[in-house]
């Protein structure tokens, strides 16, 4: 597990697709170091929420935080930020099972590429980058998307109005 948690600087590429949909290429990208601080590694590009992708990362979070950039025909169309964890978040009753876990903190398809099935492809591509991990996401107005993946939904125990949690099966390298 320690080796898996230290994969920030690894560069891995996964291609998935079919004849009907373009290939989505996913690459793990390390944070950018500037004057002793670490920043999310994404450029400002129209179609992505600038607030999500341009801030500092705390030094103690660096080894567990991974950024994934996904491209179609050389154009960045999807971004993801994941945090690797040994244990699931608490206060979501009923969810059990083996870890480790990869929390999808942010996941965004560029505006002009939404609704084309690329997000679904990308989530499975991200899963194959972290074999042996179970992905989970706290949904923020995207319940339909996460449910469409067939992931299990869990409500927050203490505050039902909190974002629901969606949990994937465990991914393997051949998922």
Image: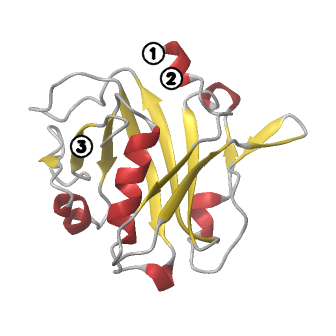
Dot 1 falls on a residue whose secondary structure is loop
Snapshot quadrant of residue 147:
bottom left
User: Would you say the residues marked 1 and 2 are in contact, meaning their CB atoms lie under 8 Å apart?
Assistant: yes
Picture quarter with the N terminus? top left
Disc 2 packing (10 Å; few <14; some 14–19; many ≥20): some
Viewed as shown, does residue 104 lie left or right of 150? right
Evaluate if marks 3 and 1 touch, with contact meaning CB atoms under 8 Å apart: no
Residue 4, label in figure: 2
Q: CA distance from mark 1 to mark 2?
A: 5 Å
The residue that mark 1 highlights is 1
Name the residue furthest top: 2
Kindly state the secondary structure of the residue where label 2 is placed: helix
Corner quadrant of residue 72: bottom right
Q: Residue at 51% x, 75% y: name it.
A: 110
Query: Which numbered disc flags the more N-terminal residue, 2 or 3?
Result: 2
Above or below: residue 58 compared with residue 124: above
Q: Residue 168's mark?
A: 3
Please, which residue is most extreme toward the front here?
Answer: 19
């Amino acid at each position: 597990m320690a080796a898996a948690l230290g994969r920030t600087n690894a560069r891995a590429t996964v291609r998935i697709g079919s004849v009907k949909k373009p290939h989505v290429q996913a690459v793990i990208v390390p944070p950018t170091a500037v004057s002793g601080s670490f920043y999310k590694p994404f450029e400002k590009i129209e179609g992505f929420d600038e607030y999500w992708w341009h801030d500092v990362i705390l030094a103690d979070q660096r080894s567990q935080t991974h950024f994934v950039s996904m491209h179609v025909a050389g154009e960045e169309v999807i971004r993801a930020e994941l945090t690797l964890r040994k244990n699931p978040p608490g206060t979501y009753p009923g969810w059990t099972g083996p870890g480790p876990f990869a929390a999808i903190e942010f996941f965004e398809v560029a505006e002009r590429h939404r609704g084309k099935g690329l997000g679904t492809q990308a989530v499975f591509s991200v899963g194959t980058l972290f074999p042996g991990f179970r992905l989970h996401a706290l949904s923020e107005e995207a319940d339909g998307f996460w449910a469409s993946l067939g992931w299990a939904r869990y409500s927050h125990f203490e505050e039902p109005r909190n974002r629901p949690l969606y949990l994937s099966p465990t991914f393997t390298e051949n998922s």
